[in-house]
Amino acid sequence: MAQTSPASLVNSRAAFQCALHGWYALHQRRLPWRDSPSLYKTVVSEFMLQQTQVVTVLPYFDRWLRALPDFAALAAAPEAKVMKLWEGLGYYSRARNLHKLAQAWVAAPAKPRTPAEWRELPGIGPYTAAAITSISFDESAAVVDGNVVRILARLTNEHRQFRDGTEAVKHFTPLADELIPGAHPGTHNQAMMELGATVCFRQKPLCLTCPVAEFCAARRCGDPETLPRLKPKQIEAKFVIRTFCLDRDRLLLRRGHASAKLLVGLHELPEASDLGVKPTAATLVATKRRAITRFAITEAIHAVKPTAALRATISRSDSLEWIPLDQLDRITLSGPHRRWIQELLKR
């Protein structure tokens, strides 16, 4: 099995860096956080891009910067405004952590600069700390995410099967650190991420136009698409019964409270168990399916009438509330639920 060892790749790193950086200078995408870059833009973009594609992030980033242009504005903003601006991006803990980070950054007498200092802030892990500090402060710290793991696995033709992405990141981080140049490490990190995002795809990588193809052992072997090898995720099925209850131009929703870590401040359609009802097949109005991390979720939505018993249940609840239909745009709904509600209201 042909293989480029990590040591031989490191020995060729000057030529590798030259090829990669030259390509990046000519072919990098124009992105708003790269135009007139700032620390704040870098931080916001890194939070938004976690587990989210660039094309999805672009309109959110523009709207966010117009509403909250700097750390001070974000720190001073009420949480409801922050969550509303984030609505639809998912993984809402990112928004709450970004809000807390801004407050901590504004309050800090000495601003963080090193990866270790940034990792003390909310929502900052090794990858985000390396990205922020290498781009904004020229810290020599390699970013290693799924894109970088894929590139390095193919460059070295590494056929070891990893338990998960975390194990793969740990394995390839020393090599990524060795490949970081002394000058402009942020440019190198962005070039690696850009290569993974636009050339070294998971499927059908563009090997013929890859700027570092000459260094890639997997390409010489003819099977780059099989790498990296990660143990398949165990998908768990979940079934949720939700309710759709209208009463005089009001919709019944459930609001996540402080104990609901993932949904605090967000509104969703209530579950049948919230209302103490047992819907029947005759009341089914929609069936929706979605995937979140390792869960394949089926959600059955049933129409429910606002009976006297239901009103009594609502009056005793601190999370159930009637929202006037003309106020739906003002509250923060999870993205899928807003789409489902709009669809059902049109009916």
Image (tube, grey):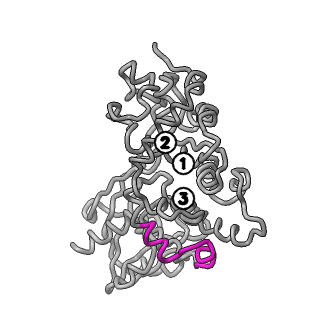
Residue located 32% across and 34% down the image: 204
Give the farthest residue toward the left. Answer: 347
Q: Give the residue type that dot 3 points to.
A: Phe
Q: Distance between the residues labelled 3 and 2?
A: 25 Å
CA distance separating discs 1 and 2:
8 Å
Q: Mark 1 points at which residue?
A: 187
Residues marked 1 and 2 touching at CB (< 8 Å): yes
Please name whichever residue, 290 or 162, is drawn nearer the observer in this view of the structure: 162
| Residue at 69%, 59% in the rendered image | 121
> Is residue 112 shown left or right of residue 48?
right
At numbered mark 3, what does the secondary structure look like: helix, strand or loop?
A: helix
Judging by the rendered image, the residue that carries numbered circle 3 is 47
Instruction: Give the residue number, with chain letter if any, for mark 2.
Output: 21
Earlier sequence position, callout 1 versus callout 3 = 3
Which residue is at 42% across, 77% downward? 310
Relative to 277, residue 117 above or below? above
Point out the stretch of residues depicted in magenta. 60-77
SS for tag 2? helix
